Image (cartoon, rainbow, N blue to C red):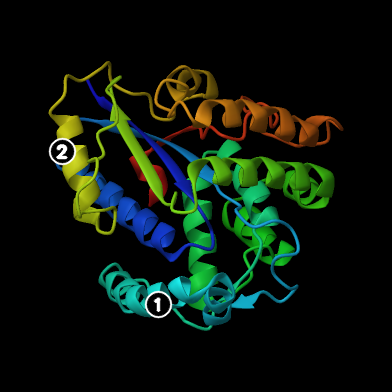
Amino acid sequence: MGTEIHVTIVFDFMCPWSFIGMRSLELAVKNMVSRQDKGDRPVAFFFKLLPLESRPPGTYPAGGSDWAEHCQAVGPKAVQLLHEELPRIIALGAKIDITFRQERRIVHTEAVNAALMLAQRFGRGLEFALAMLGYHFEHLRDPNSPQLISQVLVQGFQLPEAAVAEVLAESKARAALGDELRELSRKLGASGVPKFRVSCNGSSDLCPAGGDEGPTSPEYFERIFEACLCRAPTAAPSAVATLSESDSASKSDLPELLRPMVESLRTVLSGYAQSGSLNLPEGVSVLRDGSRDTGVRLNDLD
């Protein structure tokens, strides 16, 4: 008997708190791996990532905006918030091996968001997001760089080069996806990220509601995972869940607000498959549904 843990993540590639939360999640998951190796009950994780794009096209120049200059343009409250939060962001990041660099520039995320949707079709969404967040915040790279995206997806994750090239070339589909994500951002509100939703074996959301504690450390997620392990187990999870196996659980643990947007994203992303040129492996359907990751075993995160 085993436990299935479903994690929905709403985030922004430009948000440092998103990086802190997702790195904390990654470390908590890896801690579960070591426990599983010691004989704990089998656990399978299923991830769904929804990236937000809040600013309309043309908000940022081609080379991006300086972090401080961006806050000044937003208004005095944003500048004050930057000065108050930046030291805390840097300190929390250091605890989980993130070295934030203030020189990073804020850019639009249209291309990297589309690439994430492709990565999720291969069960590599969380890994891809973490890699691109690291390149941006720690190495000052533009996450929309076609060369960088190809390096991570093709060379790093061994995704088909033709599929990656098509996603990067489909500017109309990317633009439509950006419109959908901006609408989602508007509905969630400016303070909407990151949002995590964790459920297991059909439970409701187990993330604490309210309070001062947020997803800023591995311990936050470890306590949630402990609560999952205390619940009644289901049949032992398969080594890697198929798309059809993860599909039935995906709708049930999405917040009501996100469901219409997810269905709309399915329509937008189907445009990538119209030419029939995507070279996807056997058992993986074309980009009908960019919102749902395939089931990923803990060991796949090593």
Residue type, numbered disc 2: Glu
Q: What is the residue that sits farthest to the bottom in this orientation?
A: 103
**Which is more toward the observer, 233 or 261?**
261
Residue named by callout 2 = 226
Using a 10 Å C-alpha cutoff, classify the residue at mark 2 as few (fewer than 14 neighbours), some (14 to 19) or many (20 or more): few
Secondary structure beneath dot 2 equals: helix
Q: Position of residue 102 (x, y in %)?
A: 47, 82
**Which is more toward the observer, 205 or 43?**
205
Residue type, numbered disc 1: Gln
Using a 10 Å C-alpha cutoff, classify the residue at mark 1 as few (fewer than 14 neighbours), some (14 to 19) or many (20 or more): few
Label tally: 2
Which image quadrant: the N terminus?
A: top left
Q: Residue at x 17, y 19 (%)?
A: 232
**Above or below — where is 246 with respect to 58?**
above
Q: Residue at x 51, y 35 (%)?
A: 293
Using the numbered discs, state the Cα–Cα distance from disc 2 to disc 1 in whole angstroms: 38 Å
Q: Position of residue 124 (x, y in %)?
A: 52, 45
Secondary structure beneath dot 1 equals: helix
**Above or below — where is 265 with respect to 23?**
above
**Above or below — where is 165 with respect to 148?**
above
| Residue 80, label in figure | 1
Looking at the image, can residue 99 be seen? no
Earlier in the chain: of badge 2 and badge 1, it is 1
Residue 168 located left or right of residue 200? right
Q: Residue at x 37, y 76 (%)?
A: 86
| Residue 112 lies in quadrant | bottom right
| Residue 107 lies in quadrant | bottom right
Looking at the image, can residue 28 be seen? yes
Q: Residue at x 16, y 24 (%)?
A: 231
Q: What is the residue that sits farthest to the right in this orientation?
A: 275
Residue 143 located left or right of residue 61? left
Q: What is the residue that sits farthest to the front in this orientation?
A: 76
